[in-house]
Each structure stands twice: as C-alpha cells, then as structure tokens.
Image (cartoon, rainbow, N blue to C red):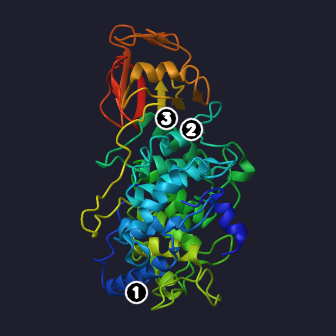
Amino acid sequence: MPRFRTSRRLALALPAAFSALALTTLPAFATSSPAQIATSRTNGVSYLKSLQAADGSYAGSGLSNEWAFSAFAASGTAVVDVAPGGDTTKNARTVYRNLLSTSGWPSASPVVTDYERGTLNAYAAGIDPARVSASRNLVADIYSYWQTTEPGYFGPSGNFNGTVFAALALGGAKTQAGGARVPQALTDSMVTRIRANQHVDGGWTYSKAEGDPTALNSASDVDMTGAAMAALCASGVPTTDAGVVRAKNFLKGKLAATTGAFNSLYGVNTSSNGWSVAGLNACGINPQTGDFLTANGKTPIDFLIANQYNPGGGFKYQPSDTAPSSYSSIDALRAVAGGGFTAAPPVPVTPGVPQWVAQPTFTAGTAARLALTLDDGTGSLKACSVTFTPTGTTTTLGDVLTAATSAATPAGCVTSVTPSSGTGIVTAVNGKANSGSNTWKASVDGSAFAGAVREKVIKVGDTIALRWGA
C-alpha cells in the first residue's frame, strides 16, 4: 500500500479479546462458501509465515509485520508455533517478546499507538501485555498518555485514533483468565469520547471531530469506522446500540453492488475493506449476509478473496496491482478469518509450549511500571503510569500510592495518601477522606472492589483501580 497509508495508520498505529466470528456455518446463499473461506485462510497463513525473517522476527523498531500476530490468532495459528525452518528457538513469540523488552523499543520518540499496537499483538501472541518483562508493562505505557485536561482521550486528542486504539487495546487484551483488565469507569470515559467523535453520516475518521460541526459533518472513512465500531464493541457496547447501528448503516451505504467492496476515501482497497470487516466481526455482525449481501450477490468477503493470490496466499492492495502487499495481506486475512483487531492466543501445537508467557515477579532493583486509575466519585477520573523500583518480588498498594505522588505520568494522579507510610486502612487520597460507608476501595486486574489497605500485595503487572464510594 502507499507509504502515506501505512504511516497514517500506525505511526497513528495500525490495530476484544475479539472472538472470531463463526464463518463455518454460513447460510447457503452466502457467495463465499465455508470451504472457500477455509482455503483462503490456509493459504493466507502460509503467506504470512513466508514474511518471517531468518532470525524469527516480524517486527523491528518501527511499523512492520507484527500485525501478522493478530491475523494468525484469528486464523487459529499460535504465534509461538511460527518458526523459521522449524527452529523453535527462533519462534516468533519469543523473538517479539525480547524486542518489546528492550529499552530502545519502540523508538526514541514513541507515541501512544506504538504501545497500543504492541498490546494488541502481544496479546494475540500469548504474551501478557502487562507482564512482558520486569521492566515492560504495555498497559502502564498506554496509561501514561492519559489526557488530564481531556479525560477519556489517550495521546493528543487531535489524533483521535490514539483513543480508538486505546479502547481496542485496553478492552481487547483481557487478562489471561479472559476477564476485563481495566475498571468500568475508564472504559466508560473512552466510550464517551468515541461517541462524541461519531460523524453525522455515522462513521469516523482518524482525526478529532468532537466539538467541531464542520468536522462532524465531513465524510467519514470506512476503515476508521471499522476500528471505532470495534472499539465500542470491545468496550462492551452491544450491537443493538444506536452508535453501532449508525456505523453499520454507514458501511452498508458504502458497498459497491458489483464487487461487494467498501468504497474508501482512499479508493477501493483490501486494507480498508479488511478494517471494515474487522469492525463488523468484532461486533458480531456477519459480513456475508443480510445488509452486506448486495443485490448482485456479492459481499465484502467475496471482494477480499477475489484479491488473493492462490496458492500463494498474499492479497493485493488494489485490484489493479500485480503483486501482494504484506500489510494488505494481514488486514485481509484477519477479516476473512473472522477476527477483529486482536484475538486470544490459540493453544500451541508445539509440545510443552504454554499458551501464555508472562513475567512472574518483580525483579528487585529493576525499575517497573504499574497502571493506576483513581475515581473519587466526582466524575473526575484520573489515570497514570507509576514508576518505582521494587525491593522484592512483590510490592504493596501503599508503596505504589506513595511512589505515585512523585513518579506518575501524567503527574498529579496522586498528590497525597493517608496514612503516608506503614500499614492499615487507606483513609484519604488526594485530600478526600473516608466518610461513613463511602470509603476508598481497591481492585486489581478487574477484581471486585474491596477496602483499600496499604499492605495489600501488588504483583508485577497488576492493573490497579482505586474508587471512593459505598
């Protein structure tokens, strides 16, 4: 695809635990049969395997082919099973985890979508994104881009895609047990911003539209519409929601009857169609039937498969192209396989290899990050990444809160905590004191909120939420 296209995506960042849409039970009138889809998936996986470098890598310091991991997962292939020449010491998961763990990744001047891309693909590869290594917590990295003056946005609000992919990453990358990792208050804040940026025509673009009538009345883009509607559904918004229905109708209005393609602002292409279909998949909307089966009997899946080289397996960016595009092949395969923008890692077939890998404990003396939200009950939610150096394999809630008063990004997340040391019940945070049944409570990795005590054990990668209330 043209270079401007890829840089717009994920220097923006190209992108819940989205479950794959079951395309093996399509009704008879769907034009691409289950057998054709299965063949497309098999050949597409073979092509993506051919993109692996001799050292086992898919990714470097910048935008590269790591999005293949989300396509592999959606296709039922464990990333840890992908190894050059069968050399399991160079399997793609291990190589990627090592890359994410380096201090130089992603670059000297990172943006929030770098960490969102890393989160979505680490999750699909079977790497717990909050526990990549003793020093790398991708969830905390995302939290550090919280916009204190515009709560709910991650990264500069003008680059709205940063917030879309925050919702995709934080909602899609579940815990290893499959539960929500972040508190509902944080999810709600992102959903509010996504809704505020929905254009009058029902879609979205990658830039901010909230509060700007001209932008809200401008034409939307099919690919960012797919991503934004997927972000809503990854956040728990139902398919029947008015915002999701408007997005679906926008995409329906962009269908070309003769091919089943979506007409994009960038012209008809497989990448934009892949993103659109991924949005439908993520929301449980079948792209092969109903609103997406044209009068000419074509669907978006038909268009994608028509632009695939077989048996080679790669997909063209545009129908007129004469060679496959790696980015387009990733986008298209993920969509054809029924995936959204990430998927839970499949169980590996390599003997003795676990489905998940994760840093088990803090390393004493190695600086670490933890993700923290603070909800004082007034609607002024705060989120930050707390940096500290543990002295043991675990730490405590009290020590995290104390560290947050001086080492949080963005600053000001925690300004004071009482008591300021020792053990016991947390009686006040930021000057807000317990009052009757309204007290400070804590949740870790989506657990039920319970009374906050300083000695509560916090483990590596724990996502911490504090809430004041009954």
- Residue 205 higher or lower than 310, as above or below: above
- Residue 352 higher or lower than 150, as above or below: below
* Secondary structure of the residue carrying numbered label 1: loop
Q: Residue 12 at x, y = what percent?
A: 65, 56
Quickly name the residue at label 2: 152
Q: Along the horizontal axis of the image, is 216 left or right of 452? A: right
Residue in the picture at 48% in, 26% down: 374
Q: Is residue 220 visible?
A: no
Image quadrant occupied by the N terminus:
bottom right
* Earlier-in-chain disc, 1 versus 3: 1
* Earlier-in-chain disc, 2 versus 3: 2
Quickly name the residue at label 1: 31
Label placed on residue 195: none
For the residues labelled 2 and 3, the Cα–Cα distance comes to 31 Å
Q: Amino acid at mark 1?
A: Thr
Residue in the picture at 49% in, 35% down: 368
- Near mark 2 (Cα within 10 A), the count class, few <14, some 14-19 or many ≥20, is many
Residue nearer the viewer, 261 or 323: 323
Residue in the picture at 42% in, 29% down: 465
For the residues labelled 1 and 3, the Cα–Cα distance comes to 56 Å
Q: Amino acid at mark 3?
A: Thr
Quickly name the residue at label 3: 366
Residue nearer the viewer, 431 or 187: 431
State which mark lies toward you, 1 or 3: 3
* Earlier-in-chain disc, 1 versus 2: 1
Q: Amino acid at mark 2?
A: Gly
Q: Along the horizontal axis of the image, is 140 left or right of 343? A: right
State which mark lies toward you, 2 or 3: 3
